[in-house]
Amino acid sequence: MLDVIGNQTLVADMSSNFLSQKIDVAKHGIIYAGAQKNAGPAGVTIVIAREDLLGNAKSITPTMCDWKIHADAGSMFNTPPCFAIYICGLYFDYMKRNGGVEGFRELSEQKSRLLYDLIDASNGFYTAPVDPKYRSRMNVPFLVNNDDD
């Protein structure tokens, strides 16, 4: 896919798949992740923005949404969420000790495969509404059959 984009700036919302696989950060202009699913407690947001993209906020942009202000302040423009940062640090250390991003990718494949196998073998009690070739390792949607209808 990156070959198709050419010299365009790639912006990615990785809220569902942050830290789920290795990515080439250098090919992205901005990576945004509401990372509570994969990196820390609720409310954790991680932004990786290429420096040349900072400083172009429109005049109507709220101060808290101007990433240059945050970058200039060392990511401490506002009082940092210390507990959330601490928990993220603990989790990053845990990930490193347990195979890193690649180890967790393999683990998520195993877990999602178990779930999909259970869903598919349930004789219709559960159904997965997503075509198998598009199934996610990170979000496993399913439906419960309701025979009352």
Image (cartoon, rainbow, N blue to C red):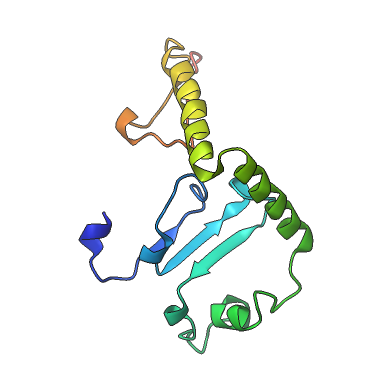
Residue at x-position 45% and y-position 24%: 113
* Residue 12 in the figure: left or right of residue 81: left
Residue 63: x percent and y percent?
Answer: 61, 82
Residue 66: x percent and y percent?
Answer: 56, 80
142 vs 104: above or below: above
Residue at x-position 43% and y-position 61%: 25
Residue at x-position 42% and y-position 26%: 128
Residue 80: x percent and y percent?
Answer: 74, 69
Please state which of residues 95 and 42 is positioned toward the viewer in this rendering. Answer: 95
* Residue 20 in the figure: left or right of residue 37: left
Image quadrant holding the N terminus, namely bottom left
Please state which of residues 11 and 142 is positioned toward the viewer in this rendering. Answer: 11
Question: From this viewpoint, which residue is outermost toward the top?
Answer: 123
Residue at x-position 47% and y-position 78%: 51
Question: From this viewpoint, which residue is outermost toward the bottom?
Answer: 59
48 vs 56: above or below: above
* Residue 132 in the figure: left or right of residue 77: left
Residue 100: x percent and y percent?
Answer: 55, 44
Q: Count the marks: how many?
A: 0
